[in-house]
Structures are given as structure tokens and as C-alpha cells.
Image: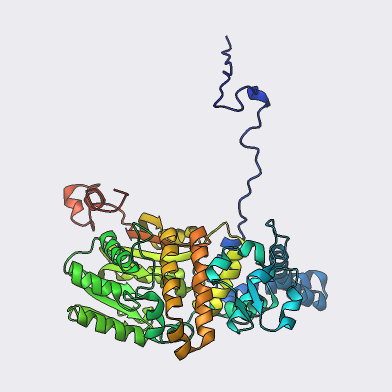
Amino acid sequence: MTETTTDIPSKADPIANVPTRTRTPASRHNEQGRSIGLPVIFWLLEQNVGALLLVPAAIAGAVWLLSGLWWVGLITLLALPVVALGIPIVSLVLGSWAKPKEETKDWAEYIEWRNPEDAKPWLGKRIPMEILYEAYMAEKLDFKGDLYETMLKRNQLFQFGFTWGDFKFYVGEFLGQNVSHTIESDEGDIAHVYNRGNDFYHWFLGESMTYTSGIFQDPEESLEAAQERKLATVCDYVQMQPGDKHLDIGCGWGPLVTYAAKERGSISTGITLAQEQADWANERAKKAGVSDRVTVIVDDYRNLPSEKWDKITCLEMAEHVGIKNFQAFLLQVKSMLKDDGIFYLQIAGLRRPWHYEDLVWGLFMAKYIFPGADASCPLGFVVSHLERAGFEVHRVENCGAHYAVTIKKWYDNWLKNEAAVVEKYGQRWFRMWRMFLGWSVLIGGQGSSTVFMITMSKNAKNDKWTVSAEEGDAQPFNRKQRWIGKNVVATQQ
């Protein structure tokens, strides 16, 4: 006997009266995922340039031998990279100039060009973002109102299309940063950024001098309270204990090493490329009364001495190691971490289902704010590399909403200190950071770029509680005891 079912009409179910067989199955839809292009790019950037060049050379050589014509082989050698790179780039650029869905507003209500001749090419059109921010920083145009408030209307005023300026930067500088990432090149790209002046950063970071996201329980609470909570949270995540030997890679102005030493009793070492950051961090530790337990090294992370640490933290520095060196960096961290140690990595990255604004913003950031930070990649890239390096990931959190609130407070601080910034550093630096902070509030708020807080340990073969008692002594730790309890923060509790 065949069992039959009858659809029972229901006011709560708008399709209840439609026969089951005539309904569209859920497998038929209009959703589209992303291609494998991005992982392929990541893989290519990891490879040795010389080895990659052998591929088109080998293909061209085979064509030459088969055709018997040397010039055919030469044309093949020249055409392969042009086709392989040119088609995706042209497709990307053309796509960025597609007509937006949103209604276009007249930017003249919000933007004023100082020279009317500069405005003529854009009359009745959306201004490309690269043209906008370059003109703003060069004092060729002004925002009639608040930059942040104007940027809320950016989908109706501006075009996120790649420009000739974007192309020149990408080919002339960005690609070179991606494929090098030597100790010398990274110091050249990064050190001067953070040696600009502690006053420069203090004018927007505030008293905490913590260049990372706070954690808010209320968006209206103070920046300092949120940053204090963040430092406590990181210490909780790595289960910081008195006497722990702690390394903070990319320690900035020393907020975490000082907090960990003072509040948790750790013996903390930080490393930075910037002498001005180190000077501030050392003075900070001295004022907190923990200078005997805080050490700050000014050097590249690759020059760290070979020793073991109980806890290693890295808050938004790993972006600078580069895609090329990311796996090597993680393996170095693993080699320095004790077998029973905990590693906390916080890393910012663009979202995998990107939109053109994300990429245009990314180029702006690489050009002016965080040069060489090409490892700002989606979560899948990061976790895949962590597991490949031999780490077990215990906890991952997306902190993007908190970051947006944090940056808005930085933006407000920056505006309050406009006169001081302009007096010492000039209008260009003030405007550059105003654009960076104002735009980044929105980028973080919508998830274009977010920050991931990842807690992990080494992935050992066995565990103390999964083998016999006599074998257990040789295992680094008991996962059950470490991750199950009242305040172990391996899970939301």
C-alpha cells in the first residue's frame, strides 16, 4: 500500500494550498558562490617567482619544438602571462564600472571643488572613490558637511570603479610588496609608519594607545573601558597565569604586555619594528611598576631568539608578514610555543564574498595606511594555514561590529584634535586619516573587512585523557581539563 499525504491549508503558510509537486524545489535558486580565483592567487603568491616563470617557459618550449618555429614559441611565451593575467584584470575593471543599482544623487550638495575646472569631468556623474580621496587629500575639494555623514550616502554619490591611479599603484608598488616581504623590505614599508610620532597616534587612539578593537558592552561606553575589557579578554583566552612566559608579536605601544604583567603576573616580552613604540611601551611599563617583568625588543619577528614561550599573542601584526611568508610565520610561532602553550592570533581581513568597495578600500589602505599588509585575507585562508601548520583551533570570533564602534570613537578623537594635527603634520595627514577613519567605520560596520579573534594550541597526536596513565605523562596537556569548566572561554559561557 502506498502512503499518501494531504496538504493542510494554513494561514501561516502562504504556499500551503500549492500542490507539493508544483512547488519550486529549494535546489533551484538564483544564489551564486564565488570562484576559486582567490585561493589560486593566494597559492601563486606563496610560490617562488623563478619557479613560476618556468611554467610558461616550458609551455613555450614545447610549442617551439612541436611547430619547429622559434617565433611561435616566443609569441606563446609572451602571450601566456598576458592572457592569464590580462583577462581576469580586464574583467574585474569592467565589472567595477557597471551601472550601480542605487539611484544617483547630485554630489554638488555634499562636495565642493575649489577649482570648477576640476569638477567638470564629473558633472552629472558619480565621482570615482580614488579620484575623490586623492583630490580631498590634495585640498582640491572639501566636504560641505561631516565626512562620515557624507560617506553614509556613498552608494548614491560615488563610483567604486578602478582608476588609472589604482592601476599604477597596484603594478608599481603593491605587487612588489606582495612578492618581496624580506626583512629589509618590511622594515622599509612598516617602521616609518609607526615611527611617525607618538603624538600623531595619541590624537586618535586616546589614553589607552591600543591600536586594535575594543570590546563593548554598550556602544556608548568609553573607549578606554572597551580597551581595558579587550586586554582582559585576550588574557582570559590564553589562560594567562602568574609566571607565564609571554611573547606579544607586534606589541605596538605595549598595552597588552603591561596589562598581562601587572594584572596577571606574567613575564612578558613584546617585539616591534618601531623605536618610538618601544620607547612608549617601556615608559608605560615603568609607570605601571612592572618594568622588571616587561621587555620590548625593536627588531623583525624573524630575528627573535629561539626559545620557548607559555603564551604567544599576535594582535593585527600577522597581516604584515605577507601571504608569501604566512605559513613560515606560523611554523615559527609553533616552534616557539611550548607543547602545552596557547597561541592567540587576531587578524583583520577582507570578506570572501567581496564587493567592489572592499577592493577599492583595500587599495587605499595598502597605499596610505598599512603598506605591505597583503595577508589581510578571508577567514578560510587563515584557518587553513593554521591547521596546515599544525594548530588546533579552539575558538574563532568575529569582532567586526566592535571594531566599527572603536573606529568611530577614533574618528571623533581625530576631529577634536584637528588644530594640533594640522599645526604639526599639515592638512594632508589630517585629511588622509580623516578619510581612513571615517570610511573604515562603515567598512567594519558592514563586514567588508573584519577582525577575527582566534585561540589555538598545538595539535598533539594524543591527549593525557585518551591514553593509559603511564602514556599520559608524555602528553602535553589534558584538553578536557583545559577546555571544560566555568571560565575556560573555549566556548560561549
Residue 101 in the image: x percent, y percent?
69, 56
Image-quadrant location for residue 177: bottom right
- Given residues 151 and 98, the one toward you in this image is 151
Q: Is residue 376 left or right of residue 473?
A: right
- Given residues 296 and 121, the one toward you in this image is 121
Q: Quadrant of the N terminus?
A: top right
Residue 442 in the image: x percent, y percent?
52, 63
Q: In the picture shown, does residue 206 fall above or below 481? A: below
Q: In the picture shown, does residue 305 fall above or below 95? A: below
Residue 195 in the image: x percent, y percent?
41, 86
Image-quadrant location for residue 388: bottom left
Judging from the image, the colouring scheme is rainbow
Total marks in image: 0
Q: Residue furthest bottom?
A: 424
Q: Residue at x 66, y 66 (%)?
A: 157
- Given residues 127 and 307, the one toward you in this image is 127
Q: Looking at the image, can residue 114 be seen? A: yes
Residue 59 in the image: x percent, y percent?
71, 70
Q: Is residue 259 left or right of residue 163?
A: left
Q: In the picture shown, does residue 434 fall above or below 342? A: below
Q: Looking at the image, can residue 41 be seen? A: no
Q: Residue at x 51, y 74 (%)?
A: 436
